[in-house]
Image (cartoon, rainbow, N blue to C red):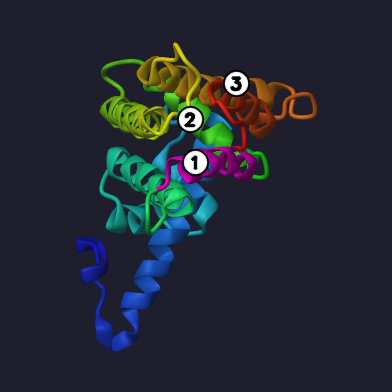
Amino acid sequence: MSADEAKVPASSGGYAKGRARREQIVTTAAEVYADVGYHGASLREIAKRAGISHVGLLYYFPNREALLAAVLERRDEEDTARIAAKVFSPRGAVQQLVDLADHNARHPGMVELYVRLAAEAIAEDHPAHEYFREHYRKTREYVHRTLRELAEQGALRDGIDPRIAAEGFVALMDGLQVHWLTSPDAVDMAGVLRSFVQQLLTEPSA
């Protein structure tokens, strides 16, 4: 439970109400960020769309950075839940990443939010800059681990460097999102990723 939620009295059923209101604010903020980007979104506008007062929003999120952090944290939690497995399997991990692209194709708002924020966060003074740097580092390492284990199993084609291939996979996954947002009917994100993986494997199956 967050410190903000702890402020809400339990006797009035406030914990549940506080959590629900906090989630409503985060959901609304994600929608506003997707519409106008982080820099174009004010806390007053987010509060208005969420149906609460500006002061009410500040009760849960004292500044813009705290709210942005909550939005990014939720996205990470959702993606981690989708690709998490009780027992790690390199082929299973590859398939889960392809499946994540397929999931994203059914949620354009989420994709647009990510693309907008990632582009804005290139600036070192952006509050999400360090988040995206760490996010990309972890993603590259996850894919590198996956491809390295496939190589150890003899499942990667000769001459393929797992680290370079991992960097290519992550770059392709992100670049596809931009192309898909521009031409959703012409770009098959999951299909392109699947084709890329098949070119890496000795026995394609992803």
Are the residues tagged 2 and 1 within 8 Å (C-beta)?
A: yes
In this rendering, the label closer to the viewer, 3 or 2: 2
Instruction: Classify mark 3: residues with Cα within 10 Å, few (<14), some (14-19) or many (20+).
Output: few
Say which residue appears at 56% left-offset and 19% top-offset: 175
> Which residue type carries mark 3?
Gln
Q: CA distance from mark 3 to mark 2?
A: 11 Å
Q: Find the distance from the CA under tag 1 to the CA under tag 3.
A: 14 Å
- Point out which mark residue 57 bears: none
Front residue of 41/70: it is 70
Quadrant housing the C terminus? top right
Which residue is under mark 3? 199
Residue 84 image offset from top left, x and y in percent = 41, 52
User: Looking at the magenta stretch, what is its main secondary structure?
Assistant: helix
Give the residue at mark 2: 155
Q: Quadrant of residue 147?
A: top left
Q: Quadrant of residue 146?
A: top left
How far apart are the two marked residues, 2 and 1, measured between alpha carbons? Answer: 9 Å
The first of marks 1 and 3 along the sequence is: 1
Residue 60's spot in the image, x, y percent?
30, 57
* Residue denoted by label 1: 91
Q: Compared with residue 151, is residue 106 higher up or lower down, i.e. above or below?
A: below
For the record, the magenta segment spans 89-104
| Residue type pointed to by label 1 | Arg
When the figure is inspected, residue 160 is found, relative to residue 198, above or below; the finding is above
